[in-house]
Amino acid sequence: MTTHLRNVLPHQDSPFFRVLHIVVAVLVMVQIINSNLTEREAMGQLTPTGIVTWLHIISGFGLLLCSFLMLAWMMTRRSFRYYFSWMFMDFRGIVDDVRTLQKFRLPEAHSGGMAAIVQGLGVVSLLGTAACGGLWFILNTMYGPDASLTRLVLHLHKFLTVFIETYFWAHGAMGILHILMTLRVQQLRKD
């Protein structure tokens, strides 16, 4: 069963990207869990809240690095147009995928397809949210939490977090569904 499961996980051809994908998923989950337990006032305190806040900051900078690595890897493996064809008003990949879904089959990943577009948007959202959080930390350190720019960037960071949380749960659910459907197809072929 372990071998079968490993074979249906994404990115079989790229162990680096598979590991990076898992690291990002774990870090995002940690961020979601601990975000409600953070307080900027606790940053200078050696309390459970202060430790959780610093864990959030450190893992946030880790996510910033990971999202840069992920975007760089994606752009070197495939083109900008592969992930962002919609920016060129090219919707052929989406139309093809919708036709495939209407036949109750899962579409393969391809340029301009749903999987590519979702991955591109997810990485850009992650990068924007992590960059905003990092900028907030720098502004908070330089100007303090009461500076208007610091508060504005914090509110933007919190706003962007909604997109990452939505993406995390939806992408995770789709990934699990895809794995289960692929396992089912493999089982049917075996029988």
Image: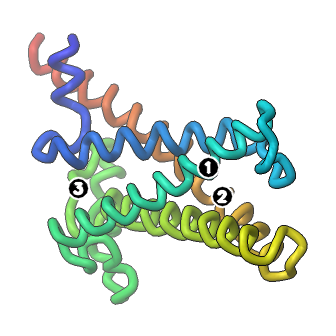
Instruction: Left or right? Give the position of 119 relative to 148.
Output: left
Q: In which quadrant of the rendered image does the N terminus lie?
A: top left
Query: In the structure shown, which secondary structural element does the residue marked by tag 1 occupy?
Result: helix
Please give the count of numbered marks on the rendered protein.
3
Q: Is residue 122 left or right of residue 94?
A: right
- Residue labelled with disc 3: 109
* Camera-side residue of 118 and 162: 162
In this rendering, position of residue 147 left or right of residue 164: right
For the residue pair 33 and 42, the one nearer the viewer reads as 42
- The image quadrant of residue 142 is bottom right
Callout 2, which amino acid?
Thr
Q: Earlier in the sequence, mark 3 or mark 1?
A: 3
Local crowd at mark 2 within 10 Å, few (<14), some, or many (≥20)?
many
Amino acid at circle 1: Glu
In the image, which is nearer the foreground, mark 3 or mark 1?
1
Q: Position of residue 32 (x, y in %)?
A: 64, 42
Q: CA distance from mark 2 to mark 1?
A: 6 Å
Q: Amino acid at mark 3?
A: Ala
Residue that sits furthest to the bottom in the current view: 88
Q: Is residue 96 left or right of residue 114?
A: left
Disc 2 target residue: 161
